Image: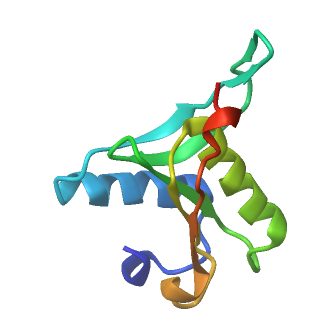
Amino acid sequence: MHRTLGPGLLESAYERCLLHELTLQGIQARRQIVQPIHYKGLDLDEGYRIDILVDDRIVLELKVVDRLTGVHTAQLITYLKLSGCTLGYLINFNAKLLKEGMKRIVHQHNKSLRS
């Protein structure tokens, strides 16, 4: 997909094309999944969305930036914590080669924090 489209498009265009590509390959995926925050009896479902959730267990956070930073990594780790997922990928479509713009994150959850 990245070889065909190249860098320079909006994040939303890559998101829709990637979802389409995953669907064509028979992979179950959904986009813009509302990710609520549960805090001491308060439920917030405002503004937090997972770009793409693959097989209800892998979080894909898409970016179109000059370079990935620690803030982008922190955002993905937060989505992993909130969703209960362990594996996530940070994907920057603004990279010349897509493999240069990908970062794999594994987050082990502390069971005592998830209740």
Q: Furthest residue to the top?
A: 41
Residue at horizontal 57 percent and vertical 42 percent from the top: 50
User: Is residue 106 or residue 76 the one in the foreground?
Assistant: 106
Q: Quadrant of residue 22?
A: bottom left
User: Is residue 89 or residue 86 the one in the foreground?
Assistant: 86
Residue 1 left/right relative to 95: left
Question: Where residue 77 sits: x, y (%)?
Answer: 68, 54
Question: Where residue 23 sits: x, y (%)?
Answer: 24, 51
Question: Where residue 29 sits: x, y (%)?
Answer: 34, 45
Residue 64 left/right relative to 14: right
Q: Quadrant of the C terminus?
A: top right
Residue 86 left/right relative to 47: left
Callout count:
0
Question: Where residue 3 sits: x, y (%)?
Answer: 40, 84
Residue at horizontal 38 percent and vertical 41 percent from the top: 56
Q: Quadrant of the N terminus?
A: bottom left
User: Is residue 20 or residue 89 the one in the foreground?
Assistant: 89
User: Is residue 35 or residue 3 the one in the foreground?
Assistant: 35
Query: How is colour applied across the structure in the image?
Result: rainbow
Q: Furthest residue to the front?
A: 112
Residue at horizontal 64 percent and vertical 32 percent from the top: 114
Residue at horizontal 52 percent and vertical 90 percent from the top: 97
Q: Quadrant of residue 9?
A: bottom right
